[in-house]
Image (cartoon, rainbow, N blue to C red):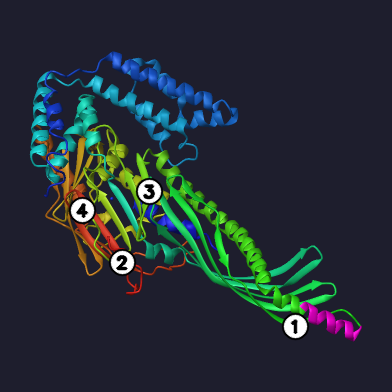
Amino acid sequence: MRACWCKVIVCGLIAAACCEEATASPSAAGGELARLARALDGAYRPLSDHDLASARAALTLAQTDLDRFLARDPQQATAWRTFLELPRLEQELARGSDADLTVLQELFAKARGNHEGLELPVMRRYRAALVNFIEVAQVVREPLLAEAWEAQRQEIAAVAEQYEQRPTAARQSELFKQLAWLHSVRQGDQLLRAAERRFASPNAVISISASVISTWSVEEVDRPTQINEVEDKQRTFGVGRLQGRAAAYPVPGDSGQGRLEMRFNGTLRTRVTTLQDPVRIQSHGVAPVVARKPVVLTEHGLVAGPTCSRVCYNNLVDCIGTKLKIRVADSLVTKLAGGYVERNEAEIEADASRSAEQEFNAEFDEDVAEQLRDANNSLTEKFRKPLLRQDLYPRQFVFRTTHEALDAELRYDAPGHPAAPAPPPPLQSGWDLGIRLHESSINNLGHTLLGGRTYSVEQFETMFNETLAQFGLDPDDVGTSDESGESEADLPPGDIGIEFDRAMPLQVQFIGDVATLTIRGRRYLYEDRAYPPMNIIIRYRLQNDEGVLRAVLVGEPEYVAPPGVGGLRVIALRRILRSHITPRIEKEIVQREIHLPDSDGEDEIGALDFHQVAADNGWMTVSLRRRNRSDGDSLATR
């Protein structure tokens, strides 16, 4: 039996790595956010060198823990210290408040990548302390003026009050932007904690229908067996053949666990000879076999329970003979043996059924254990480790199952970057694979990857492609694009560097089937010159065109300077961005059907066409339906 359990989870897990109506009741928090926002008046506490010293001490402690961990293997310790450039870190920490943040950013980039070992807790604690020191140093070196704080504080209070009066998706996006800024200057802890409690629903949900799970995990079993048993003075030998089908099905689960059941239905046919001197009995049997094995799915992998099977053996005697040479004695013993078999037929069949059940359970447990090892290894190597190494692992990751589907619920949030306000919208009936992303999931991932960091456009594209490759995805297969943009040869020479905004470098909004992407550059670098902040705004309308997903560019990309930023350099930067960025933006992105090959590269599911495409109320909902599904398929109708 092939590693079918790997197929059950990889679909949802990989698909994960490929993200203006009311969104909450006005009375949901009783005005707590507005009250705490108003309480920011007079609560400003600028960060000082003392705060920086505390962050530096925390980083030193994290580095000491890392050194102590590496000391367990001196050879590896030398290699790791060289790779992470820890001596360089020590030099910068010795400079205290004068540490070069550019160097620290480079060291942080070294510590975050797809390298074996970077997923370990000690490495993650080191990265967290390093990025905290960088962010605190940035705030200390760029103190917020009291006048700027007062103006921003009033805006935060106004946005919070408007949201609580009428909570819409657009107002929620604005509120989230203000919360991100508040966290970036390390203020308003009480408001940030209240928002974290208020917006705590999963913001990414991947759903797989029972029909897809059972079809994708189905295994045809055709296994010949040799029978050779000895009990007391009786020996039974012969051949058997087990034929049937095994498949996985979701069953209702709770406590954040997914519950699956491996079910087998088949038939065992045997032809055996039983010897017990001097009697020889030849018989054949047919036994229906039904088995079930529970499997629990958590973020850490799959764990199976014992197999429970039922075998109803029906034995038919073909002939009875003896090894005796005396004809009368042979005839007498044969009659006696036949009478014994006839009188004890039910007991004999019950014993045979119990023996077959025990043997089947042992073999089925062994087969599934091997499959679970493959699935758990795949989950660890292709999902957990790559995400942990880049600090992209969700803060909450749970599974839920019903008879119709398996749901994987993920929550990406952090202080100042909350999750969704409520559960996701339902999927249209008839779906087979569903993905629902709240805009906060993409925005929060964008903050983790880009916040305060500087990339050239080419570096950004390389990072994006490498991230996809870590999960086995080819960027060319993610979507197909019409030839609507300019070629690379048409682009002007030179590359643009973008220093992304620390608070919210990337913001996506889903309203009215339009996905609006705002890229916030805190500073731009071009030909050894620095340019002021600028926001790049791109809009795509999402639509389902008879099973094909189309994202059509709405208008032209906009290059908008933040309020209060102007001058000749803004005009020059806008012209540069139009020359370098606009040609890279496709006017239409087309994604046709997708296929879900199994671990052997076979396409058992067939083509999946887009069934539902929607982007509204802060959620993007995409579902797909098997092209070859029939009315007899088990449909998920949630």
Q: Which of the pair 505/287 is nearer the observer?
A: 287
Real-space CA distance between mark 1 and mark 3, rounded to the nearest whole angstrom = 55 Å
Q: Residue at x 19, y 54 (%)?
A: 615
Q: In the picture, residue 392 is in which quadrant?
A: top left
The residue singled out by tag 3 in the image is 254
Q: Nearer the viewer, mark 3 or mark 2?
A: 3
N-terminal label among 1 and 3: 3
Instruction: Please state which of residues 463 and 207 is positioned toward the viewer in this rendering.
Output: 207
| Residue 635 numbered mark, or none | none
Distance, label 2 to label 1, CA atoms, is 56 Å
- Mark 2 or mark 1, which has the lower sequence index? 1
The magenta segment is 326-337
569 shown above or below 285: above
Q: Position of residue 333 (x, y in %)?
A: 83, 79
The residue type indicated by label 1 comes to Cys
Q: Horizontally, is 301 left or right of 14 in the view?
A: right
SS of the residue under disc 4: helix
Q: CA distance from mark 4 to mark 1?
A: 85 Å
> Badge 3 local density, few (<14 within 10 Å), some, or many (20+)?
few
**Residue in the image at 10% along x and 35% along y:** 159
Camera-near label (2 vs 4) is 2
Looking at the image, is mark 4 or mark 1 nearer the viewer?
1
Q: Would you name the residue on which mark 1 appears?
A: 319
**Lower sequence index among marks 4 and 1:** 1
Amino acid under label 4? Pro
- Horizontally, residue 37 falls left or right of residue 604, namely left
- The local crowd at label 2, few if under 14, some if 14 to 19, many if 20 or more residues have their Cα within 10 Å, is many
Residue 625 is marked as: 2
Residue in view at x 54 percent, y 28 percent: 70
Residue 330 falls within the magenta-colored stretch: yes
Give the x, y percent position of residue 206: 33, 53
Label 4: which residue?
583
